[in-house]
Image (cartoon, rainbow, N blue to C red):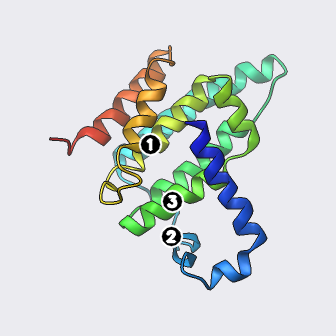
C-alpha cells in the first residue's frame, strides 16, 4: 500500500523537475486543473463522510497536541482529498485527482501510515473510494477495494469503522 504511494509521489518529483516539457507533452491532461470550481461540494454522502473524517482527525489532533506531538499531515491529506472528491466529475478528472492526491501527500503522512495511525489509515481508505468507477483502466482495477481491505482490520474506534463501512458501500454498490 505504501509502495504505490511512494511511486506516485516519485511522479511528483519528476513532474517538478520536468514541468515545462511535461506541460506540453502527452500526459499534460493528467496534471491540469480538472475543475475550476473545486469549491463546489461533492455528492452529499461524500461531503458527509469527509465531515465525519474531519471530526475524527480533529479529536486525534487534540490528543496529539496535548501530548506535544502535533503533526498536521493527516489534516493536509484530508484537505487535499476533499479537493480530489470535488474534481471527479468525469473519468479523466477522477484519474487526475487520484494522481494529484498521491503527489501532494507529505512525508509525515507516510510516517503516520507506517505507524498505522488510525486517522491516516482512514484517510487512505477514503482515498480508495476515488478509484470507484475506474475499472475500465486495467491498471487501476481493484485498487480502491484493496486499499480498504488493507486498512480494514487495523482500525479500532467506532467512528473509523463507520467510515470504512461507508467506503465499502461506495465501492461495492455496483458490484455484481
Q: Which mark is residue 128?
A: 1
Name, please, the residue furthest toward the right. Answer: 68
Label 2 sits on a secondary structure element that is loop
Q: Which residue is label 3 attached to?
A: 97
Query: Which one is earlier in the sequence, the residue at label 1 or at label 2?
Result: 2
x and y, in percent, of residue 146 in the image: 41, 36
Residue density around tag 1, few if under 14, some if 14–19, many if 20 or more, within 10 Å = many
Rendering quarter of residue 28 = bottom right
Q: Judge by depth and name the residue closer to the eye, 137 or 64.
A: 137
Residue pictured at 80% horizontal, 29% vertical: 70
Residue 58's disc number: none
Badge 3 element: helix
Number of numbered callouts drawn: 3
Farthest-out residue, left: 176
Residue ID for mark 2: 37
What is the CA distance from the residue labelled 3 to the residue labelled 1? Answer: 12 Å
Q: Quadrant of the N terminus?
A: top right
Q: Residue at x 57, y 45 (%)?
A: 4
Q: Residues within 10 Å of mark 3 (few under 14, many from 20)?
A: many
Q: Is residue 67 visible?
A: yes
First in residue order: circle 3 vs circle 2: 2
User: Height in image: 94 above or below 119?
Assistant: below
Relative to 38, say whether 5 is above or below. Answer: above
Amino acid at each position: 500500500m505504501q509502495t504505490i504511494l511512494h511511486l506516485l509521489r516519485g511522479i511528483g518529483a519528476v513532474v517538478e523537475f520536468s514541468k515545462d516539457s511535461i506541460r506540453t507533452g502527452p500526459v499534460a491532461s493528467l496534471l491540469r486543473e480538472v475543475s475550476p470550481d473545486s469549491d463546489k461540494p461533492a455528492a452529499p454522502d461524500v461531503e458527509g463522510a469527509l465531515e465525519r473524517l474531519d471530526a475524527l482527525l480533529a479529536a486525534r489532533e487534540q490528543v496529539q497536541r496535548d501530548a506535544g506531538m502535533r503533526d498536521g499531515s493527516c489534516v493536509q491529506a484530508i484537505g487535499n482529498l476533499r479537493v480530489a472528491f470535488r474534481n471527479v466529475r468525469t473519468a479523466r478528472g477522477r484519474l487526475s485527482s487520484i494522481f494529484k492526491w498521491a503527489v501532494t501527500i507529505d512525508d509525515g503522512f507516510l510516517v503516520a501510515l507506517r505507524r498505522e495511525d488510525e486517522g491516516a489509515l482512514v484517510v487512505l481508505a477514503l482515498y480508495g473510494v476515488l478509484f470507484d468507477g475506474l475499472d475500465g483502466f486495467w491498471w487501476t482495477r481493484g485498487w480502491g477495494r484493496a486499499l480498504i481491505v488493507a486498512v480494514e482490520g487495523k482500525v479500532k474506534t467506532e467512528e473509523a469503522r463507520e467510515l470504512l463501512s461507508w467506503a465499502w458501500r461506495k465501492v461495492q454498490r455496483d458490484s455484481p
